[in-house]
Image (tube, rainbow, N blue to C red):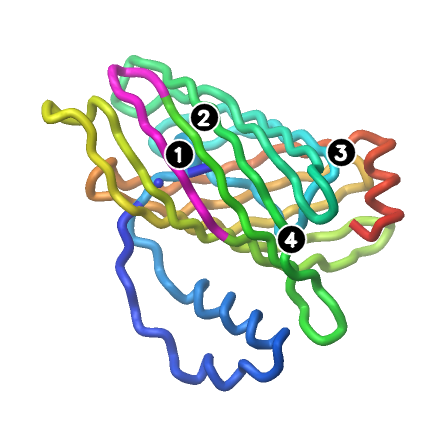
Amino acid sequence: MFMLPVRRSSVPSSATCLCVGVSRLRVCAIVVLLLVPAYGATAQAFTYPSLQLPRASIRDYTAAIASGGGTSVLFQWREGAGEGMHVGLDAGFADPKNSNNLRLFVGGSIGREIMRAASDQPLDLLVTGGVGAAFGGGTTLFRVPVGVSVGHTFALDDGMSITPYAHPRLSLDVCQGCAASGSHSTVGLDFDLGANFQVNREFAVRAAGSFSGSTRFGSENAFAVGLNWTPGAVSRVGAAGGR
């Protein structure tokens, strides 16, 4: 879930020559998107990475701690909502820097697979959207992000694997109580880079950095590390289905 303004840069013209065939066109579009640098935004419902892998979840839970604009404690729950789709809930609290007020944050999300790694292309692709809010200190921050998580899973020995991914997101960010005039809004960009280390079918370690900065809400990058758990029965279903 989600905040930041955008500075555009030129995309190398050589990127277009990679786009041959339908699947390669989609891969090219992803590469172009990832070449756009971040200038401003905050992270999810508060300042933390999304920890969103590029595949839909059947069911999993993540507990994480994040630094960035202060310290945040985060809980995530993702639940399958049909083939190649899930919904999610984020909740937690944050202790911002230079403030004596704790913030409560909560948000909802949705993810939809639109491409999976195959013999003709190496990437998994998940389109994401959501809404989130953070409360406390006399202000309320709202975020409505839309993005794409893209990555690839590398199989290791003994059932282990590692999945590096990127998750850029555009968002509409609104702050109530940030100034005497009332509310302020901006369009922002978050850009996450992370990895998931799957220890076994049930447990994984996730870590990610969120590159952000906003002239309106402050400039803070963030880093998070967490433990992910997929219940045993669900993990067996996912393994049988190739997830």
Residue 144 falls within the magenta-colored stretch: yes
Which label's residue is closer to the chain start, 3 or 4? 4
Q: In this view, does 177 lie above or below 235?
A: above
Q: Which residue is found at the position 70% from the left and 41% from the top?
A: 57
Discs 2, 1 touching: Cβ within 8 Å: yes
Q: Which three-letter amino acid code belongs to the residue tagged 3?
A: Thr
What residue is disc 3 on? 230
Nearest to viewer (mark 1 / mark 4): 4
Q: How far apart are marks 1 and 4 (CA)?
A: 25 Å
Left or right side of 34 for 138: left
Classified by dominant secondary structure, the portion drawn in magenta counts as strand
Write down the region rendered in magenta.
Answer: 135-147
The residue to which callout 4 is attached is: 113
Q: Which of 81 and 210 is in front in this view?
A: 81
User: Which of 36/89 is in front?
Assistant: 89
* Label 3, residues with CA under 10 Å away: few <14, some 14-19, many ≥20: many
Q: What's the residue type where badge 2 is placed?
A: Ser
The residue to which callout 1 is attached is 47
In the image: residue 164, left or right of residue 174? right
Q: How many marks?
A: 4
Q: Which of 227 and 11 is in front in this view?
A: 11
Residue under label 2: 72
Q: How far apart are marks 2 and 3 (CA)?
A: 23 Å
* Residue 190 picture location, percent across and down: 39, 48
Identified by mark 1, the residue type is Thr
Mark 2 vs 1, N-terminal side = 1
Q: Look at the image and say whether residue 24 sits in the magenta stretch.
A: no
Disc nearest the viewer among 3 and 4: 4
